Amino acid sequence: MSVVPYAFVACLVVGVVLRARYGSFRNLSRTILADGGHVRGDETEEREKKANLLRWVTTVDHKDIGLLYLVFGTVAALWGGVDSMMIRTELLTPAVDVWSEETYNALFTTHGLTMLFFFVTPVFFGMANYFLPLLIGADDLAFPRINAIAFWLLPPSLLLVRGGLITEVIARVLGLGLPRSMLEILYTLAPPATGWTLYTPLSTQLANPQIDFMLLGLHLSGLSTMMGAINFIVTIFMKRGPDVDIGDFDIFTWSMLTTSGIILFAFPLLGSAILMLLLDRNFGTSFYAVEAGGSILYQNLFWFFGHPEVYIIFLPATGLMSTILPKFSGRKLFGFKFVVYSTLAIGVMSFGVWAHHMFTTGMDPRLLTSFMIVSIAIAVPSAIKVFNWMTTMWKGDIRLTAPMLFSAGGLGLFVIGGITGVFLASIPIDVMYQDTYYVVGHFHMILMAIIPFQMFAASYYWFPIITERMYNQRLARLQAVLTSVGVFVTFMAFLIMGALGMPRRFASYPPKFQLFHDVASVGAFVIGFSVLLWLYNMLHSLWFGDLVRDADVWDLKKTQQFTREWQAFEARLAEKYGVTSTSPEETRAAAESQMVGDQKDEPDTGSPKAFEDLSGIGNDVVVGAVAGFVGMMLMSAVLYVGSLLGVFDLVSFAELAELVGVEGSPLVGYLIFLGGGMTTWALLFVTFADFLPGEPLLRTGLVFAVVMLPGFFVAFYSGQSGWELVGYILVAFVAHLAYGAGLATTFKMLSGRLKTSLVHVSE
């Protein structure tokens, strides 16, 4: 059963209806307005917006909906990120001794589904909602109300997919005062443990009713994505400004157009596969029975959607890379047409590679050979993009801002991940590594390097347009470096242990792989910490960032790259604040190379110095150790009181000793804990204090301690429940506040006598 003809007919029907109603597609931009279809000629008056909750619930404005998408995607990303941190915490030790195997399988399932369906696509759709109309000279998307419906389908979809965890949490909270018999229905909806691919026959045989809700949620999210894709296609072709021709499209527009086209042909397959799975589970049908094709039929349907889905989330990121990287290289994108052609080629070829996920299923070798050839060939368009990005930077006037650091760092990591994919496209190698961490490392190295990196880059690049404020650029550069290091450490460890034969999808593993897993977990925690830095930077700068009154915040006019969205931003500033447009004294065409010998020494715009003054490093170590000792003594006192109250178990320190490979009593573990508080955490405080909320320093110490609290809570949790769990949380919170207060206060006192590198104190 093929849905491709139906998708084509759907597109044709949309076109015929629009043609019949409006006569000429090119006149559509002058007949449909953002208020949902009222014809007002060329009138451009903007309606007044209500600054309350009702406005956000009822809005049809593309910018508002874009922001809603971005907020929703960020929440989903944090939720899925917590899943990954819990997975890596379990894998710190070979045995299953943190969570249960069922919990691990549920985390593995929800992490994949949340990231793919509720994080990546909504974030890119949010960016497209906000900026695509600006880039093509449109006043809004073609169907504003459908745009709003597409977004509001997502929150209930996410709740349906993740409802098992939500109902379990509600049941545990209510269980503090109600008998379990009254809450049995809530416990019945357990988090699904099918794996994110939902393979049959497991997904048809598990009795958990939450799986049915999950399938309904995925189907709703697919409908939402289809609505958004149709809206983007119609908008690009029929709502663009009169002075914008197809040849004038920017690279991000081309990427979103290709992505939307892939969605139209891929997502109907997912919907069909899910509906048949629901029917098999609930109505006794036999679509996936062994006699009807069984798991092989499901895998063909799923991966015909699944691999194009990879490019659905990949292509918008490449469009952002091609947009942002030239701006900070001082040159226009090299080989623009070839980058566009490579994007279109990926869109077509993405439907011819799905069976490389099925090399070990026993398919006809002749079929597998054809898929192997296409899987290798599809690397060529991606390689074209890589070489064009590298050539764009060659002899450019590179400025190492946060967007550029993410672009350059992502480019290097993407090359590593991409090369490993070429190997996996070969049948003999894939058969060897199909079920190992090598596949996980390849997949995550590519996706992390190109997708979150470009999301971070775009959030920093366009932040002034959205908020009219500027973020902390020093903190942003630090976050870019930390993220790059964390991704490299984590997924290189995946690739190495996968090459050594470490199987994937297991909560337990042979002890010989523990070192690699520990390294990967440390790298993952670095990634998690860097995400918290980004979140803090965004939220803090939203309210307290420096106001932007000059639209050319990135000096794009110098290289004639002051594009449409920035021109619209400049017009907005002029209208709101009466700011006049400025022009640089000198400009040059972006096509010209900036020769190395001609570069000027401009520290404000060039490569930043990570450490400007190293003279206080030795003093930092001494002062940090003393301050950390004082903080640890205060913290230890609170924890001891917690042990007397029965909410904190001192045996947890013995488990800490075992975690680092030292067998011993709680005393040995406590000494390790004390050493960490005097060295690692104290030096981290010195390093990051300048990026946390500033004066007084005591406030900074308290914030730093609260940031560290989740790690402590997980590491020293010993099975408390009910009121004991509440007491444990309170004791841990107070203990960390005591540590932060002692650390910051002592550091402040000693820094008055010894010179340190901490800006808070030295200034």
Image: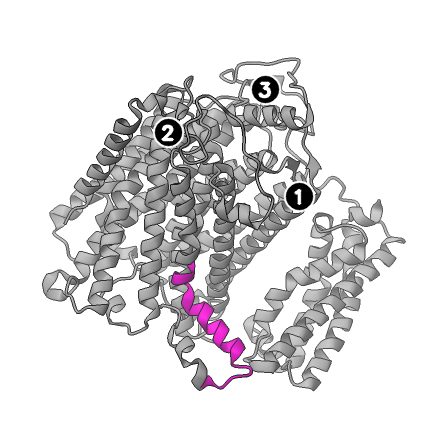
- Which residue position holds label 1? 541
Q: What percent of the width, then of the height, locates residue 240?
A: 40, 25
Label 3 amino acid? Lys
Total numbered badges shown on the rendered structure = 3
Q: Which mark is residue 236?
A: 2
Query: What SS does tag 2 mark?
Result: helix
Alpha-carbon span between mark 1 and mark 2: 33 Å
Instruction: Read off the magenta span.
Output: 158-180
Q: Earlier in the sequence, mark 2 or mark 3?
A: 2
Distance, label 1 to label 3, CA atoms, is: 25 Å
- Looking at the image, which residue is at 39% across and 67% down? 106
Image quarter of residue 256: top left
Mark 3 residue element: helix
Name the residue type under label 2: Ile
Image coordinates of residue 689 in percent, x first then y, are 73, 52
Check the image and tell me how it is coloured.
one colour
Q: State which mark lies toward you, 1 or 2.
A: 2
Report whether 352 appears left or right of 399.
left
Residue for badge 3: 557
Q: Secondary structure at mark 1?
A: helix
Residue 634, placed above or below residue 72: below
